[in-house]
Image: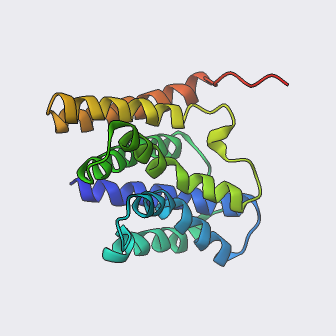
């Protein structure tokens, strides 16, 4: 079940890449590139930093095909796809899920709490950062959004329950729930981080 949820998160992130390509008026190839980097960029960065080579999508090509299929299947409907609550909430769930996966992999690799939490955040956010940079804009997560912040909090909770209290499943559920809920509340209530003064 966790594997299929991971694939669902991959598809949602890939769709966000395609939508970014649509906004920037890129061609179909650009759409597929953004779908791929958004879906697998964070996990790729994590694996390279942790020395886990070959990276996850080389060992399991399903991730590549899910991202590409999401892009191809969405192309005919791009004019009708709008960024609604369902898509934003799904993205929030994907962020929580990828945070857990990144933390879990780092812990299994023998990393410290700090590295595990950072790898959770990287897994959930770096794909979107690469997408935004390729689109020639400041990364979404650096512009007052409560996104990476939610991931950090989720990573801390996962570490505490998985490592300190030996309750890994509780940590997984709590991390995903808190990250998803905090992100949804930030969207609905328009919560923002303080802006740096000039």
Can the viewer see residue 176 in this picture? Answer: no
Left or right of residue 167: residue 18: right
Query: Residue farthest to the left?
Result: 166
Q: Quadrant of residue 9?
A: bottom left
Residue at 37 percent across and 76 percent down: it is 58
Residue 13: x and y in percent read 50, 56
Residue 101: x and y in percent read 32, 50
Q: Quadrant of residue 112?
A: top left
Can the viewer see residue 54 in this picture? Answer: yes
Q: Quadrant of residue 57?
A: bottom left
Quadrant in which the N terminus is drawn: bottom left
Residue 173: x and y in percent read 25, 35
Query: Residue farthest to the right?
Result: 198
Nearer the observer, 51 or 159 = 51
Residue at 73 percent across and 25 percent down: it is 195
Q: Is residue 54 above or below residue 85?
A: below
Nearer the observer, 120 or 174 = 120
Residue 40: x and y in percent read 47, 63
Quadrant in which the C terminus is drawn: top right
- What is the image's colouring? rainbow
Left or right of residue 106: residue 144: right
Q: Is residue 131 above or below residue 73?
A: above
Residue at 51 percent across and 61 percent down: it is 41
């Amino acid at each position: 079940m966790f594997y299929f949820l991971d694939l669902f998160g991959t598809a949602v992130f890939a769709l966000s890449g395609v939508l970014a390509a649509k906004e920037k008026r890129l061609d179909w190839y650009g759409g597929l590139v953004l779908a791929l980097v958004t879906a697998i960029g964070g996990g790729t960065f994590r694996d390279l930093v942790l020395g886990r080579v070959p990276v996850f999508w080389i060992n399991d090509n399903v991730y590549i095909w899910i991202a590409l299929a999401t892009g191809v299947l969405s192309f005919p409907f791009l004019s009708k796809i709008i960024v609604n609550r369902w898509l934003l909430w799904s993205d929030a769930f994907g962020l929580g899920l990828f945070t857990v996966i990144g933390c879990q992999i780092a812990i299994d690799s023998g990393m410290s709490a700090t590295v595990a939490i950072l790898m959770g955040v990287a897994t959930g956010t770096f794909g979107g950062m690469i997408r935004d940079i390729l689109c020639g804009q400041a990364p979404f997560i650096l512009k007052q959004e409560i996104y990476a912040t939610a991931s950090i909090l989720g990573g801390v909770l996962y570490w505490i329950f998985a490592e300190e209290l030996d309750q890994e499943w509780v940590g997984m559920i709590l991390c995903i729930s808190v990250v998803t809920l905090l992100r949804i509340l930030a969207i609905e209530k328009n919560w923002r981080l303080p802006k740096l003064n000039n």
